[in-house]
Image (cartoon, helix red, strand yellow):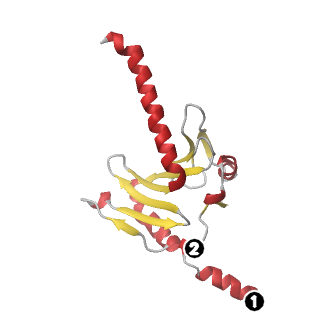
Amino acid sequence: MQKYLILFVLMLPQSLMALELFGVTVNEINRVQLREAIRNTGAEVVREAGDDNWYDVYNMSVNFKQSKYLFIAYDKTTANFAFAEYHLPYDYLRSMLLRLKLKYGKPDIKYGSFESENRFLWLVDGINIELTQDWDKSITRLVYTQPATIVPLQQAYRQSESANLSKLLQVDGSYY
């Protein structure tokens, strides 16, 4: 019976399986748990989010040689996962695309004017996964986004940026 259950789980489409990052289920994770899981990999903490910073930054080159940095953001009020973004070498797109296809299946493709503008998209366990290239920054981006928490985070960020700009204009307004 156990052998058949394992076979059944292996045959499930990836879209029905829980998405994990660093061995923890993304939809059930909070800031404390994910930070601990990332630190356990040996990643170097560059900066952790706080009052002035909106996201954590990790140097992942110790355990993921192709990765330059990993950025992780959380909802400021609930501490739930909002997004994770890997910065990879520009020429790593094809290799990462193959890995993601093997893990999550065939992506939806949003074609751009140029090949470097193509976006490869998956939806797994309610998490959006996007693989793109930024030719002007010479990087490949792999982004995991939780739609339920990214929207409030983006709204709060825009409000914060607007408030910061207003303060700056009040201070510098008399000089021009």
Percent across and percent down for residue 46 are 58, 39
The residue type indicated by label 2 comes to Leu
Residue at 41% x, 61% y: name it: 93
Q: Secondary structure at mark 2?
A: helix
Amino acid residing under circle 1 = Met
Q: How many marks?
A: 2
Q: Residue at x 59, y 32 (%)?
A: 51
Frontmost residue, 146 versus 136: 146
Q: Position of residue 167 (x, y in %)?
A: 44, 21
Q: Residue furthest right?
A: 1
Sequence-wise, the earlier of marks 2 and 1 is 1
Quadrant where the N terminus is found in the figure = bottom right
Can you give x and y, in whole percent of width and height, for residue 126 in the image? Answer: 53, 63
**Corner quadrant of residue 45:** top right
Q: Residue at x 48, y 66 (%)?
A: 123
Q: Residues within 10 Å of mark 2 (few under 14, many from 20)?
A: few
Tag 2 and tag 1, C-beta contact below 8 Å: no
Image-based side of 18 in relation to 129, left or right: right
What residue do we see at 70% from left, 84% from top?
Answer: 5
Q: Secondary structure at mark 1?
A: loop
Residue 90 percent across, percent down from the top left = 39, 54
**Residue most toward the top?**
174
- Quarter of the picture containing the C terminus is top left
Query: Mark 1 sits on what residue?
Result: 1
Which is more toward the observer, 88 or 4?
A: 4
Residue 22: tell me if it is visible. Answer: no
Real-space CA distance between mark 2 and mark 1, rounded to the nearest whole angstrom: 21 Å
Residue mark closest to the camera, 2 vs 1 = 2
**What number is the disc on residue 16?**
2
